[in-house]
Amino acid sequence: MLPKELLEVRKSKGKIIPKFAGKDDYPLAEKIIKIFSSGVGKKYGSVLSALKSVENADNYRKVRGFARVMERFCEKVCMFDAPSHLDPVEVRLYLFERGYITSRKERQRIIEYAARYFSTTPEEIERAMFADRDEEQILVNVRQINADTLIKLYNLSLLQTAIFNALRLTFWTSSNHKEIFRRIKWLGLMYELYEEDGQLRADITGTASILKMTRKYGTSMAKLIPSIVKAERWWIRAEILDEHSNRIYYLEMDDSHKHLFPVYDEKIEYDSSLEVEFERKIKAIKPDVEVIREPDVVKAGRYAFIPDFLIRKSSREVYVEIVGFWTEDYLKKKVEKIRESGVPLIVVAREEYACGKSESADVILFSKNIPYNEVVGRINHYLRGDISEISFEGDVVNLKELSNSYGVPVNEIVGVLPQDYVLAGSYAVKKDVFERIRNEVEKINPEKLSDVIPVLREFDVGYDVLRAMGYEIVWIGLSEEDAIVKRIK
């Protein structure tokens, strides 16, 4: 991106058109590259002076824009004529604390005080005073770049700057979807995906639509542009608010302008620690579910979503989306579309990225830590099976396993127990089978638990069925050999 004051555009009939550099600008681009290359080993201030010498009323924005791009290819260091331990900030702080000076003699006296304080010479204090300022740094390296690349990178920066104050950015691409959608998530952008004319389009809420963190958000939106314009085919349309006239202009471009831009990957700093933690925590709390990170885009009618996780259990699924920047209206619309589509989705939003407030019960807010108990509660709700679909099969049904499989509490399953089954502890047992087990146990007339273990294992039931048969277990120790079986009086 370029500073706003370097933006060059033309406005006509409600449209805004960036003044991109072209073939006529090659001589200027080559001159800028030569100035930087010739400045290696010199103070950066000499490079800035040389740049000013080629500026005029018509080209100064372009000269400074080219220079901004060139700075990405430069390496500068804070360097003295001789090695020094001095920190320029500490030196300035010491000098400025001495107060105002009114003469050269007084200035020299304070410089000498500083030299004694820092155990050095007055000359080194003079050099160190502003050694960390940009113009005082030494240009030590300029990576190779040609005029064509410089012009294309400048054009890309110009486009990024033009859409910085957009109310909305709408785009479509024929390819590169995975990278684009991933970057939308990484950048925390507020988005809406929908199908129109057989194409999956994306609406990105623009900086001018929010009231908070506009600089950070605008920069994030601009970082998405390189991924869009490097697609095979693409189209973008930005609604841009003019701050002076308060009028909305439209910027519209497609891949016919592809020759203006480089194939370039914008570096994005992305902290994945939250997603890593989420996956680990959910797996630890609910080991019976499958947690799939970064599933494919989910379509819901004509809309689509980019969830961060798919949580699956048997045939039941729920998606989780961790929202970056958000407004109340953005979350409200997202939740409404989710509800209308019937797609089960849990929205988790960071309070620190809030551009407003949210009182929606459908959104889980967090500041420092995600409230995992609440999230798991929502997951359980969505993964819960339909109790009417529960089927009892076999002579013996383990109710705990059935509960885990359907996500329905055991006490609710007991309420739909078929008439030909009897409840025996944590098992549903066919009545005739239950009678056979009871008869086998009574034949043994057990005194110890170990006496009936073979019978229980034969029918694949646990100790807790004995109480339904009129027996109780008295544990003497931890061993089955020591446990006593008594009839309940």
Image (cartoon, grey):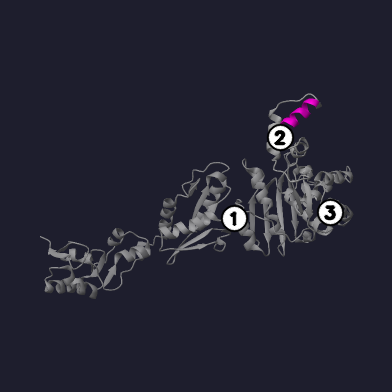
Q: Residue at x 58, y 48 (%)?
A: 325
Which mark is first along the chain, 3 or 1? 3
Q: Say few, some or many: other residues with alpha carbon within 10 Å of mark 3 (under 14 / 14 to 19 / 20 or more).
A: some
Q: Is residue 35 left or right of residue 234?
A: right
**Quarter of the figure with residue 414:** bottom left
Q: Quadrant of the C terminus?
A: bottom left
Three-letter code, disc 1: Lys
Asked if labels 1 and 2 touch by Cβ distance under 8 angstroms, the answer is: no
Residue 197 place in picture, x, y as percent: 66, 61
Q: Residue at x 20, y 74 (%)?
A: 455
Which is nearer the N-term, disc 3 or disc 2?
3
Report how far apart the C-alphas of labels 1 and 3 lie in the structure. 39 Å
Instruction: Point out the residue furthest to the left here.
Output: 489
Q: Which residue is mark 2?
A: 92
Q: Mainly helix, strand or loop, the magenta region?
A: helix
Q: Which residues are magenta?
A: 105-117
User: Element at badge 3?
Assistant: helix
Horizontal relation, residue 386 to residue 176: left or right: left
Q: Position of residue 425 (x, y in %)?
A: 23, 63
Name the amino acid type tagged 3.
Ser
The residue that disc 3 covers is: 37
> Where does residue 259 sit, x and y in percent of width and height?
79, 61
Mark number displayed over residue 185: 1
